Amino acid sequence: MHEPHLACMQNARIVLVQAKRQKVPSVNPEKLKLLVTQEMPFGKYKGRLIADLPGHYLNWFAREGFPKGELGGLLALMQEIDHNGLSEILDPIRTRPRQSFKDRGA
């Protein structure tokens, strides 16, 4: 395993420990990494990191239904993290800085 990947996994473990302290359901570190690297593939927020989707959009999916498959699981996980005010636990594993919605023209 090369060093950047090792450092990323160590940061993901730190995030998991923080999540457990905050009573977030158990999650795979690879899923957390996907939240900060995978972009929304469709809709108004197409191209934005899943971790940067606004809470109202995630809550809409929670009410109306998440998409099937991995994307739906990631959106549900992010909604739970956001709903509980824990979005900052993802900061140590981000590969690009979090941006406010004003910065992105939402």
Image (cartoon, rainbow, N blue to C red):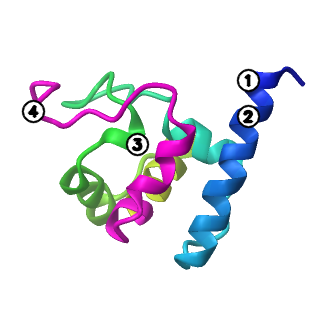
Labelled pair 1, 2 in contact (Cβ < 8 Å): yes
Of 58 and 30, the residue lying toward us: 30
Q: Is residue 27 left or right of residue 91?
A: right
Q: Which residue is mark 1?
A: 4
The secondary element bearing badge 4 is classed as: loop
Residue drawn at (57%, 44%) of the image: 69
Picture quadrant of residue 55: bottom left
Q: Earlier in the sequence, mark 3 or mark 2?
A: 2
Residue drawn at (73%, 23%) of the image: 4
Q: Amino acid at mark 1?
A: Pro
Residue drawn at (59%, 47%) of the image: 32
Q: Residue 46 appears at what percent x and percent y?
A: 29, 25
Labelled pair 4, 2 in contact (Cβ < 8 Å): no
Q: Which residues are magenta?
A: 80-106
The secondary element bearing badge 1 is classed as: helix
Labelled pair 4, 3 in contact (Cβ < 8 Å): no
Q: CA distance from mark 3 to mark 1?
A: 21 Å
Q: Which residue is mark 4?
A: 102
Q: Earlier in the sequence, mark 3 or mark 1?
A: 1
Q: Is residue 35 left or right of residue 86?
A: right
Q: Which residue is mark 2?
A: 7
Residue drawn at (40%, 42%) of the image: 51
Q: Which residue is mark 3?
A: 51
